[in-house]
Image (cartoon, helix red, strand yellow):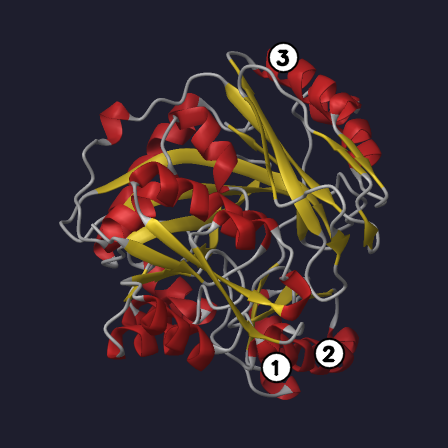
Amino acid sequence: MFSKILIANRGEIAVRIIRACKEMGVATVAVYSEADKNALHVALADQSYCIGGPEASESYLNENQIISTALLAGAQAIHPGYGFLSENAHFARACRKNGLVFIGPDPESMERLSDKAKLKELIRHTGLSVIPGSKAVFSVEEAKRAAERIGYPVMLKACAGGGGRGIRLIRCEEDMDEAFHQAASEAASAFGDGSVYLEKYIFPARHVELQILADEHGNAVCLGERDCSLQRRNQKLLEETPSPAVSDAQRSRMIELAVDAVKKIGYVGAGTLEFLLDREGNFWFMEMNVRLQVEHCVTEMLTGVDLVKWQIRIAAGIALNFTQRDVRMDGAAIECRINAGSCGRLKMLHVPGGPSVRFDTCLIEGMDVSPYYDSLLGKLIVYAKTREETLRKIRASLCELVIEGIPTNIAEQLRIVEDERFTSGKYDLTFMGNRG
């Protein structure tokens, strides 16, 4: 096991990783930008180093500075969290070159699985159903030919995409020219890779993902599914597990297929297989995230499995000490993402409590919410033995959560969990006004 880990991230995920390390007896090293000098993760870590200016490119994306800091501090491993460098094969390879363990998949796996068009071809041979689509297309004419073969409407997506960026819905050939250039430009700006591919637009549908843990000894388990259909402009707002749209028989079958697929592609680490679930009950594979998901904690609440600790153990070469039969998926858990509406200074914070109520956050009173990073302030997660009880608990917890000085989406989240479409479980990707 590692004696010291550097966390190459900020915000609530950096705090989350530091807490897991402390519980494991592992020393921590925080890195921070000039904008984050008073941040909570800086105070909680055993050592903290400023690595650059407020822009992410100057600090949290500065590979050389992060690696130099890890070596200076005597860390053996780097945990990238999510976002920033978490899916960067070049950074993972640089870690290995410098004798550091990257807590995540190896760079070869990341390169092999990062191209979503190529990944779908790989997954197609594992037995999972893949959304009909194309390989990477590099011109409008090539995209039009592929769309004609697939059939309109189609989704144009970035091959190296994530976070809802580089995506366009195209209903007819006349829409292709502008959408292609927009998607390619957005993808190049966001990911440094402007390549795009097409896939059939499945509508209406739900977004359901399966959480996987796999070690280097050939063991793999699936920790059930998360329903992530509550989205605005492809950005997730709320997640729950288990999905009210998935039957026990469907769940068992998809878990079996997902575990088998991960073993066949030789994946090691924490990963997520993402699917669209159509109204006929068919699962269509979309993509795989080779990192910790923002919404990982809702799965932890349901199963009792600490995903961050297991990421660390797997990276240290430790085998999973439980099997699929040991995974508990009784009850229900819901997570609400609490986002800032604008920048400002936090004047007051009151966090709800009680059994099985969790608020993952980096907030401390008096802090300034910076304009340099994303708007996520924290994640409110609750668990109960039934979905009905969980719904009551999330409503009560949202009412108790107080954040003053910064506009937030707490009221909107309360409206969502009180909406009959959500409480009935009969919602899909159109809930927030997304239209087919």
- Give the answer, above or below, for where 23 lies relative to 375: above
- Give the answer, above or below, for where 116 lies relative to 91: above
Q: Which secondary structure, mark 3?
A: helix
Q: Residue at x 70, y 22 (%)?
A: 397
Q: Residue at x 31, y 26 (%)?
A: 327
Judging depth in this view, the residue of 281 and 395 nearest the camera is 395
Which residue in the protein does label 2 denote? 182
Q: Residue at x 43, y 81 (%)?
A: 64
Residue 348 placement, left or right of 250: right
Instruction: Say which label, 1 or 3, has the lower sequence index.
Output: 1
Instruction: Say which label, 2 or 3, has the lower sequence index.
Output: 2
Residue 382 placement, left or right of 105: right
| C-alpha distance separating marks 2 and 1 | 10 Å
Which label sits in the foreground, 2 or 1? 1
Q: Position of residue 378 (x, y in %)?
A: 65, 42
Q: Position of residue 325 (x, y in %)?
A: 24, 25
Q: Position of residue 418 (x, y in %)?
A: 78, 22
Which label sits in the foreground, 2 or 3? 3
Mark sitting on residue 59: none
Which residue in the protein does label 3 denote? 388
Mark sitting on residue 188: 1
Q: Which secondary structure, mark 1?
A: helix
| C-alpha distance separating marks 1 and 3 | 44 Å
Residue 167 placement, left or right of 281: right
The residue type indicated by label 2 comes to Gln
The residue type indicated by label 3 comes to Glu
Q: Residues within 10 Å of mark 3 (few under 14, many from 20)?
A: few
Judging depth in this view, the residue of 182 and 384 nearest the camera is 384
